Image: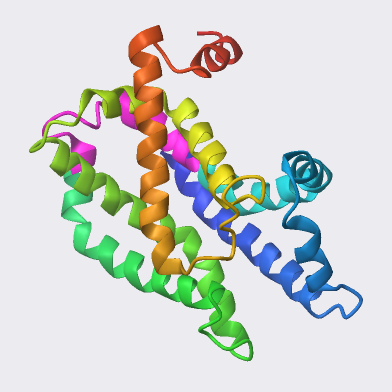
């Protein structure tokens, strides 16, 4: 857990670097954002694939800065949870979350609301310090909100029995994650339904939940028939298990 805790300040440093880079790019008059947007939108599947192939080095670098520390921290926290039997009744970890739930809410809600206001443009660009805080503090706000979600899901799972297909999907999370991306690409890509930039933020909530549910059901059905998800054998070979 110490390793996971160290990932929070590291993530804040990385997010600050991203904010500085974004500001530098946005103030560069030589860059046309219209051209960039047009180059990445539309076209068929092959065109979209070629564009993503050309963009992947920059995208990968940004993802490492944006999500790398938090992903490593989440992985370390998951290992610690497995070793300490976190999901059992009256586990020390679960009781600790329950004890600090009010503090988590105080941290999570303002930081996530501020982040949403910054990235959606509600906060004016002239408020540079506030924008930087909103962008950087998500490194703390996102894990805090995730802990609240985790607490609620655990409490709910002890009251309501989850459908077996969803349990199987959770046991094959890599396949579920990739399936959601494939379905989202079809829904929003021009080679599919082409809904990118066609919907508001409120409309994206039910669509995202529908995509996630469909993907989990499909993976659950596959796992029920074949014993595990389509990508889990690859993951087991890589991990040596």
Q: Which residues are magenta?
A: 72-94
> Where residue 160 sits in the image (x, y, percent)?
10, 36
- Whether residue 171 is visible, yes or no, is no
Vertical relation: 171 (above or below) 47: above
- Which residue does the image show at 20% across and 48% down from the upper left? 152
> Where residue 65 sits in the image (x, y, percent)?
66, 52
Q: Is residue 88 magenta?
A: yes
- Which residue does the image show at 53% across and 75% down from the upper left? 120
Q: Total marks drawn?
A: 0
- Whether residue 197 is visible, yes or no, is yes
In this view, the residue farthest toward the right is 30
Corner quadrant of residue 142: bottom left
- Which residue does the image show at 53% across and 19% down from the upper left? 231
Vertical relation: 132 (above or below) 190: below
For the stretch drawn in magenta, what is the main secondary structure? helix
165 left or right of 208? Answer: left
> Where residue 7 sits in the image (x, y, percent)?
53, 48
Vertical relation: 20 (above or below) 9: below
């Amino acid at each position: 857990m110490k390793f996971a805790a160290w990932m929070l300040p590291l993530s804040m440093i990385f997010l600050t670097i991203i904010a500085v880079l974004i500001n530098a790019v946005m103030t560069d008059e030589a860059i046309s954002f219209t051209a960039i947007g047009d180059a990445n939108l539309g076209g068929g599947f092959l065109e979209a694939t070629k564009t993503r192939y050309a963009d992947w080095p920059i995208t990968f670098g940004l993802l490492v800065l944006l999500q790398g520390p938090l992903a490593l921290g989440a992985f370390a926290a998951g290992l610690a949870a497995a070793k300490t039997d976190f999901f059992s009744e009256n586990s020390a970890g679960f009781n600790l979350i329950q004890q600090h739930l009010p503090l988590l809410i105080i941290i999570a809600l303002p930081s996530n609301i501020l982040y949403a206001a910054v990235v959606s443009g509600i906060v004016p660009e002239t408020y540079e310090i506030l924008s930087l805080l909103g962008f950087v503090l998500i490194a703390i706000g996102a894990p805090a909100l995730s802990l609240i979600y985790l607490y609620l899901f655990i409490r709910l799972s002890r009251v309501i029995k989850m459908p077996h297909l969803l349990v199987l999907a959770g046991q094959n999370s890599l396949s579920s994650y990739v399936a959601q991306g494939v379905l989202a690409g079809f829904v929003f890509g021009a080679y599919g339904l082409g809904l990118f930039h066609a919907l508001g933020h409120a409309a994206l909530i039910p669509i995202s939940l529908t995509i996630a549910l469909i993907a989990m059901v499909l993976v659950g059905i596959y796992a029920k028939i074949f014993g595990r998800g389509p990508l889990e054998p690859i993951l087991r070979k890589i991990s040596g298990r």
